[in-house]
Amino acid sequence: MVGNHAVAYAVKQAKPQVLAVYPITPQTTMLEKLASYAASGELNAKLIKVESEHSAMASIYGAALAGARVFTATSSQGLLYMTEVIYWAGGQRVPIVAGIATRAVGSPWSIWDDHQDFVSKRDAIWIQMMAENVQDAYDMTLQAFKISEDKRVILPVMMGFDGFVLTHTMERLSTLDDTTVDSFIPERDFNIIDFDKPIGIGAIATQDNYIKYRYKAMQAMERSKNVIEEVSKEYSKLSGREQHGLVEFYKCDDAEYVIVAMGAWAGDARAAVDELRNKGISIGLAKLRVVRPFPKEKLMQLKDRKAIIVLDRAYSYGLGGILATEVKASLYNANLPIYSVIGGIGGKEFGKNEIMGVVEKLLSGKLESEVWVL
Amino acid sequence: MNFLRGNAACPGCPIPKELDAILDVYGKKTVVVVPASCSTVIMGDTVLGMPSSVNVVHSPFAAAASIASGLSAAMKFRKDDANILVWAGDGSTSDIGFAAVSGAAERNEEITYVCYDNEAYMNTGIQRSSLTPYGAWTTTTPSHKHEFKKPLPFIIAMHNVPYVATASISYLADFKAKFSKAKSMKGFRYIHLLSPCPPGWKFDASLTMNIGKLAVETGMWPLYEIENGVFKLSSISKPYVDKAKRKPLEEYLKLQERFSGLSSEELANMQAYIDEMWNYIAKVNNTKLTP
């Protein structure tokens, strides 16, 4: 299946009751598939065919308040357009799952892949997961529903996967059977709207109180780290596919050098690591599966390496590569060089060979602390 | 009482009365969706609680119609007959949230959308909206507004929705009858209230009901229904098809400082607008509006 269809299939199996659909490339075929599942009766859900992404998020937020399991998907400009309601839903801590087909943001126009849209939502009180391949996107979507509705968490979850690179790429997919999914994600059993106990949802919080809500949100996000690991372990058992929780450390045990990356090009980095290992270079990969909460404690195991290279497909203008900045912050006590490589912006080709080129530059002492691969 | 007194509404504000009357008709099994507006404040805070006897879902400025659509979809999914009611101001309805309102109307969502129109952004301190009438002073139209009010009930009616009505809390029986009818119907129902605002319109807080009445009697605010596309003037407003029966516009304007200092040309433009509106109403009354 192509990535969009794999995610749609996972969503169908998770049995959401309300979906909002609005098109944007390269996400569109995911929601088209879900619309066809609903039309054929394979999925029993209400589809709201909204007039914008702002309304897509608003409508599923409303449905989630009323107890429904919900889903929508978007990309790029669409994600930016729904941002106000993304923050609103995060602040109110309702369980929502959104599929994000990552894509560059304008201007100028670009429909191709990078991570700028996705990482721009990192402070919105949403859990953010990022898939490496189509299988990962399927597996993560199912885990996302479970994490989102876990009572120790109750946070919305974004499942990111690279636009076109994964959304439109066909891969062999292993799926769980429906009954296994049913037992993994049982029906949502809590509601926020109760007619016997009316409340105001999202009412004004005064100066002494607003900060307490935010403090609780921070705690929920911290608690989610264990829940994500737990759900990952449970899913690994069910599926027979190792899920690795917040971070996958690949060939890192003895590695002198480590590449840190998230998303589809972690696959290229994995291939580069294998090839460099064959050449006798001691290198590994730390694949970030989750970037909110950021796995800073886990990354501490990289503190005694010779150097780290962080790959970024997004940039904070005036500061630096976004993941690089966060990795540096996580390892601020460690004394090791952390190199920032910016590539793949707006879909610019950046694969195994480019990654190997960067590593070779590092080994020959020619890598600058921040490099844009143009 | 469905809406407790001692809330944060300004003296003379009709909002608590309007909500009280609506909830009297709609009952406990109602969720009220409130976008950013005066009502955000009136609906209380997380510590002191709220004056409403039903669930209130607060919404970002442009999102109320969409949040209501989602609430309604979830209720429908589990075959719950709860009423989903949007309570939104004129800025939210006719400006920033207009796309969402139009979308929900086009989809014929199972919601009642109420626009309480106080004819400007009052919560932020009286800035003009597209529903501010021609001739009104606001802080962003310091020498009066020179564009006419959007004909919003007609615009919504053109979406082919089952029910559109205008109402005024100064006419409680008509007001409640319209909400009762809306409640008994399915699909997207839209009720537009003229909601006089003492600080924003600059009149004495004791005059709210009178101002509401004068708006109807001078022909500024015609009361009507558009049921399945058929326009029907409400009996209270029927006499005013005849211009001679309308009170002089001046009686409405002189009580409100926002209209002070209008030139004779501006006054003539306002009168012409009202006359034209009534000519149109006379023509379409008891007929089906067609796009």
Image: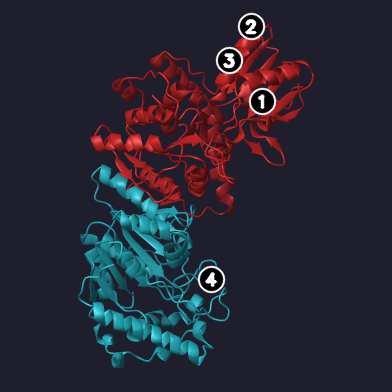
Q: Are marks 1 and 2 in contact (CB under 8 Å)?
A: no
Tag 4 subunit: B
Q: Are marks 3 and 4 in contact (CB under 8 Å)?
A: no
The mark nearer the N terminus, 2 or 3, is 3
Which residue in the structure is indicated by mark 1? A310
- Alpha-carbon span between mark 3 and mark 1: 16 Å
Nearer mark to the viewer, of 1 and 2: 2
Residue B111: percent from the left, percent from the top? 30, 56
In the foreground, A350 or A239: A350
Which chain is red in the rendering? A
Identify the residue under disc 3: A271
Say which residue label 4 marks.
Answer: B127
Chain label for disc 2: A
Residue A91 in picture, x, y percent from top left? 51, 44
Q: How far apart are the alpha carbons under marks 1 and 4? A: 49 Å
**Real-space CA distance between mark 4 and mark 2, rounded to the nearest whole angstrom:** 70 Å
